[in-house]
Image (tube, rainbow, N blue to C red):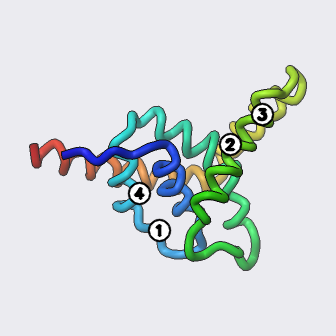
Amino acid sequence: MNEQYSDIDLCEALSEIFVDNEVEYYGIAYVAKNFPIEHVEMVYFEWVAPICYSNLQTPVPPIWTGFDREWLWKSIQEYRAKNSQLGRFRLFFHKIFLKNLRNEYITRSGWNELKQHLELVKKESDNSI
């Protein structure tokens, strides 16, 4: 039986990649498997990473036990609303920012690791049917 997950659940799971602690990719993949891979990738790079990646860019990351679910969702919604109002000039630079996020070692390596776990979890699910 498939559990029902929403985008807030997906964002919360994906944010764990940006916590200064050992990442439990299998648990994240268990949530992410309920969404199309393209959606998971978009949410990771365009919603979660812009809000959370800076946590791992400081010498002593302030968040190491997990992002607050309500704070995270509110921050993502505010970020998306703000960027939906951008003019052409600012939108151009925002797209460059998002492209650079995809190439950052932290975000790219987290995504690559998650993809591997997601493939394993999906195979396990397919074999159990």
Q: Amino acid at mark 2?
A: Gln
Q: Are marks 1 and 4 in contact (CB under 8 Å)?
A: yes
Q: Nearer the viewer, mark 3 or mark 2?
A: 2
Q: Are marks 1 and 3 in contact (CB under 8 Å)?
A: no
Ranked by sequence position, the earlier of labels 4 and 3 is 4
Ranked by sequence position, the earlier of labels 3 and 2 is 2
Q: Are marks 1 and 2 in contact (CB under 8 Å)?
A: no
Q: Amino acid at mark 1?
A: Val
The quarter of the image holding the C terminus is top left
- Tell me: residue 120, above or below residue 37: below
Residue neighbourhood size for the residue with mark 3, other residues' Cα within 10 Å, grouped as few (<14), some (14–19), many (≥20): few
Residue neighbourhood size for the residue with mark 4, other residues' Cα within 10 Å, grouped as few (<14), some (14–19), many (≥20): many
Q: Mark 4 highlights which residue?
A: 28
Cα distance in 3D space between marks 1 and 2: 25 Å
Ranked by sequence position, the earlier of labels 1 and 3 is 1
Q: Nearer the viewer, mark 1 or mark 3?
A: 3
Residue 77: x percent and y percent? 68, 42
In the image, taking residue 72 as reference, residue 13 lies left or right, namely left
